[in-house]
Image (cartoon, rainbow, N blue to C red):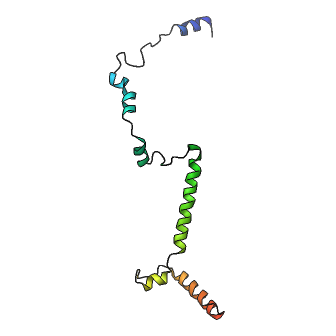
Amino acid sequence: MTDQDANVVSQAPVDETPISPSRPNPARKNSLEHHLAHRPDRQELINKNILPASTAAPAIQAQQKELEKHMRADSLNEKIAHRPAPETVLEKHIIHEDPRSPEDKYAEAIEDEYAKREGGA
């Protein structure tokens, strides 16, 4: 760059208009105070699932959530283990059709037949 080019660049017009309006809007100026004054309380944020319902320290909330997940899975597995067999539900006329597929029915019939022949059933 020559001295003449540098001089031309330094003399370029600069836009000095303010970014914000010259007369600030009072409503906009106080908007932060307004939003802070009208923000929802903790219980409302918990009800909307924005905040966790836990009162545990934030450092252990992830572990608490994982524990709750495993406890729920254990509870469901326990309930599934104690549910009645499809035959029982059919006999009590709770359902009218066997929910098992034909392949499952066939496999169970074969197992029952083997168990009878071996003296297990």
x 51%, y 82%: residue: 102
| Number of numbered tags placed on the structure image | 0
Q: Where, by quadrant of the figure, is residue 9 drawn?
A: top right
Q: Please state, as top left, top right, bottom left or bottom right, where the C terminus lies in the image.
A: bottom right
Q: In x, y percent, where is residue 117?
A: 64, 94
- Side of 48 relative to 1 (left or right): left
Q: In x, y percent, where is residue 100?
A: 50, 79
Q: Where, by quadrant of the figure, is residue 38 drawn?
A: top left
Residue found at the very far front of the displayed protein? 55
User: 66 above or below 18?
Assistant: below
Residue found at the very far right of the displayed protein? 118
- Side of 98 relative to 23 (left or right): right
User: 75 above or below 48?
Assistant: below
Return the residue nearer the eye: 78 or 2.
78
User: 104 above or below 8?
Assistant: below
Return the residue nearer the eye: 9 or 119.
119
Q: In x, y percent, where is residue 76?
A: 52, 67
Q: Please state, as top left, top right, bottom left or bottom right, where the N terminus lies in the image.
A: top right
Return the residue nearer the eye: 27 or 120.
120
x 36%, y 30%: residue: 34
Return the residue nearer the eye: 71 or 7.
71
x 40%, y 32%: residue: 36
Q: In x, y percent, where is residue 23?
A: 34, 16
